[in-house]
Image (cartoon, rainbow, N blue to C red):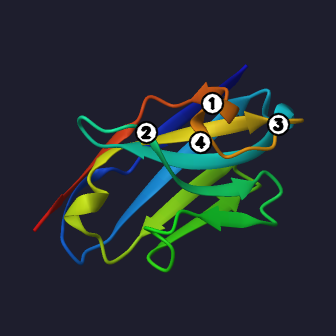
Amino acid sequence: QVQLVESGGGLAQAGGSLRLSCAASGRTYRISALAWFRQAPGKEREFVAAILWTGSLTHYAEAVRGRFTISKNSAKNTMDLQMNNLDPEDSGAYFCAARSLGVWGLSASDFGSWGQGTQVTVSS
């Protein structure tokens, strides 16, 4: 089992910045990638960004590319999401997720471990 704990959500103004962190523990040797997803009220959970467990490759949703940066600290088994130039459309619950070895997609169903989520609210 892999345990994920998010931190760092909160309230920001449009154009501002927030940084989210995710700490992974447990059977981390089974992780192939980590990702952030978000979910706004009444909407489906959507992909935000992902990074390989090795940290060698990243991928972003079009809506956040150029504004968000995903990174990984291998020594601490943590992953961060730096969010700049925030927009009210970025508001929602942000979830950290882990994908197991042998799985290759970036859909929510490809990620078997999830954190409890952290709330991000961007005011206009």
Between the C-alphas of marks 4 and 3, the distance is 21 Å
Secondary structure of the residue carrying numbered label 1: helix
The quadrant of the image that shows the C terminus is bottom left
Residue 113 is situated, as x and y percent measured from the top left of the image, at 63, 27
Mark 3, residue position? 103
Q: Which amino acid type is shown beneath numbered disc 4?
A: Ala
Q: Which mark is residue 45?
A: 2
Q: Which amino acid type is shown beneath numbered disc 2?
A: Arg
Between the C-alphas of marks 2 and 3, the distance is 19 Å
Marks 1,4: beta carbons within 8 A: no
Between the C-alphas of marks 1 and 4, the distance is 21 Å
Left or right position of 59 against 103: left
Q: Mark 1 Cα within 10 Å, few/some/many (few <14, many 20+)?
A: few
Does label 4 or label 3 sit earlier along the sequence?
A: 4
Residue 57 is situated, as x and y percent measured from the top left of the image, at 77, 66
Circle nearer the viewer, 4 or 3: 3
Secondary structure of the residue carrying numbered label 3: loop
Q: In front here: 13 or 73?
A: 13
Mark 4, residue position? 23
Does label 2 or label 3 sit earlier along the sequence?
A: 2
Residue 120 is situated, as x and y percent measured from the top left of the image, at 28, 51
Instruction: Look at 50% across and 69% down and name the residue there.
Output: 62
Does label 4 or label 2 sit earlier along the sequence?
A: 4
Q: Which mark is residue 109?
A: 1
Instruction: Look at 78% across and 51% down and name the residue there.
Output: 53
Q: Is residue 48 above or below residue 34?
A: below
The quadrant of the image that shows the N terminus is top right
Q: Which amino acid type is shown beneath numbered disc 3?
A: Val
Secondary structure of the residue carrying numbered label 4: strand
Secondary structure of the residue carrying numbered label 2: loop
